[in-house]
Amino acid sequence: MQANGSGQDRESELSLRTGSQNGETSSSGIPHSNGLLTSNGNTVSNNNNNGVLCHSDSASDNNSTEDGTSGRKKKNRLSESEEDVIRLIGQHLHDLGLNQTVDLLMQESGCRPEHPSATKFRNHVIEGDWDKAESDLNELKALMHSPSAVVRMKFLLLQQKYLEYLEDGKVLEALQVLRAELTPLKYNTERIHILSGYLMCSHADDLKAKAEWEGKGSASRTKLLDKLQTYLPPSVMLPPHRLQTLLKQAVELQRERCLYHNTKLDSGLDSVSLLLDHTCSRKQFPCYTQQILTEHCNEVWFCKFSNDGTKLATGSKDTTVIVWQVDMETQHLKLMKTLEGHAYGVSYLAWSPDDAYLIACGPDDCSELWLWNVQTGELRTKMSQSHEDSLTSVAWNPDGKRFVTGGQRGQFYQCDLDGNLLDSWEGVRVQCLWCLNDSRTVLASDTHQRIRGYNFEDLTDRNIIQEDHPIMSFTVSKNGRLALLNVATQGVHLWDLQDRVLVRKYQGVTQGFYTIHSCFGGHNEDFIASGSEDHKVYIWHRRSELPIAELTGHTRTVNCVSWNPVLPGLLASASDDGTVRIWGPAPFLEVQDAEGLNGMNVEMSSFERCCRLLVQRICSRSGSLYDADSFCFIRCLK
């Protein structure tokens, strides 16, 4: 930097400030050791404290009155928040190695990035001067809120000192630290026993492996400094990389508040722009019909994506199950297999954990259950315990070797893959079932408007959820914490299974006494979807009671929805109108919408009949042709 014009007074002020810090009283152009400007306008390099300055808070105000330039305005004192911002910026610049810039920023603002004692402590830790670092702790003790924190900090310092002695082969010195310094602290005795075992390490690499330690040097000392900082108030020493941490939190908060955010993004700051607020367009959300599956010839009662997202199974009143193959690039579905012979129709389907098998159940008057090998299309088991049974629901145990099934006539069975009965629970009129991840607990909604947990190992049961109206169906989130209920005449309710409390009631859906199946879905299961008797599909953000989308297109009740667990932009719905609709993002995106898609490369082109047909190239690897009027998928361009 170079001063010009009326900058002479400014040089005088800078020199006076610097002189005050270094015990000098003149601004006669003598170069200062902190890298600030001299009176001839030249910059002198600095060598102090790795480029981090520590100033007296009142230096600026005192020097401004001692200066001979009475016509200059006295600088306004910075607010606490403004000082915090300057400290954050200074720390970030220092992390980037812009130390002279930090010096100038702190000198001009009159701030300091951290307490002088903290700066000494930092330097001594990085240099590995453990005796001086311990001495610095005594100065910092008066600035700390918890006296016991000094003991913890000293323990961490001595631990590093001990490990470095061992790496250098100084076993006697390490033993002395262990006996005379660490042990008398009487802190974390268990850890001291572990440290003593490192004396038996034959070489440095063995020590690093057993101690899970980076070894002597700046890497391990910097990590140590980060741990030590947690015991110091931020007014004394800023937490490491504080500005970046705040920016990441701000970006993540914007994503959480975005109703349509449905993509997994890198948590780092390099993947986003800090110059714009985060926004997602509704056109990027699965609100548009991509494909209509019309192969069923009667009402479609159920649909379910496989756990790996590569298949969709649909069950119908027409007595068939159709398995569809999902192209994971084009997100287009094609018929894979048709499974026939379900005399009463198919009202429920369940994929095995490894997607190798598919179980099909019928309506209330069906006493049979079918277990299909999906790959071969062969029926492995057709189970029926009694003609008086009603097997309308099924759930797989997480081990994939057992399943539970039941119905409203009081049957509740646990069976193996061959249909052999392992256990039974009498008198439970089951409406819907779910096996939790602990492989022991089975959740069952019954005719008493409740969900109970049943343990087949010790034959115990307990009440978990009690509603005031019949629970027509329910599903559970992947982590087993939340349950989504479709309640007769009430709609969709979200329950916390751990705290056993009703979290939210979602509005909009029309729910009578028909069985409608809702689902969690989208990135991180942030969204909820449900069919409705008013022919629509409703979508909510999990934290909002009002729907963010109402999907139209079906002409009769929508019985079931399923969100692809791998492709967050793909949703399926099954309806009494005999169709299955596949929903996805809008096939035509404006240029600004395309630019807003993170991690997605979208190019727009058209044929000569540009008013009728458009082609969209997605992900730079595949193309899909859509009808310009209906937005429906036509064919894949290969």
Image (cartoon, rainbow, N blue to C red):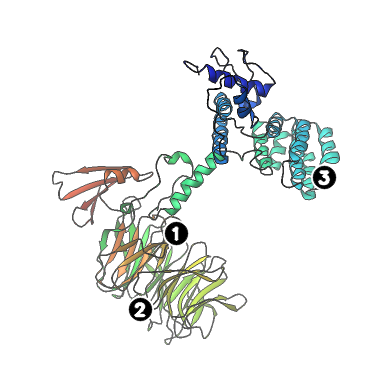
Tell us which disc is closer to us: 1 or 2: 2
What is the spatial separation of the Cα atoms under label 1 and label 3, in whole angstroms?
A: 48 Å
Question: Which of pointers 1 and 3 indicates the residue nearer the eye?
Answer: 3
In the drawing, what numbered circle is on residue 185?
3
Instruction: Residue at 48%, 46% (x, y): give it.
Output: 250
Please report whichever mark, 1 or 2, sits nearer to the chain's N-terminal start. 2
Q: Secondary structure at mark 2?
A: loop
The residue lying at 41 percent from left, 39 percent from top is: 275
Quadrant housing residue 79? top right
Cα distance between the residues tagged 1 and 2: 26 Å
Does residue 394 lie above or below 122 as drawn? below
Location of residue 189 in the rendering, given as x and y in whole percent from the top left corner: 80, 49
Residue 581 lies, with reference to residue 557, above or below; the image says above
Amino acid at the residue labelled 1: Glu
Residue bearing the label numbered 1: 525
Residue under pointer 2:
512
Label 1 Cα crowd, 10 Å radius (few <14 / some 14-19 / many 20+)? some
- Camera-nearest residue between 191 and 594: 594
The mark nearer the N terminus, 1 or 3, is 3
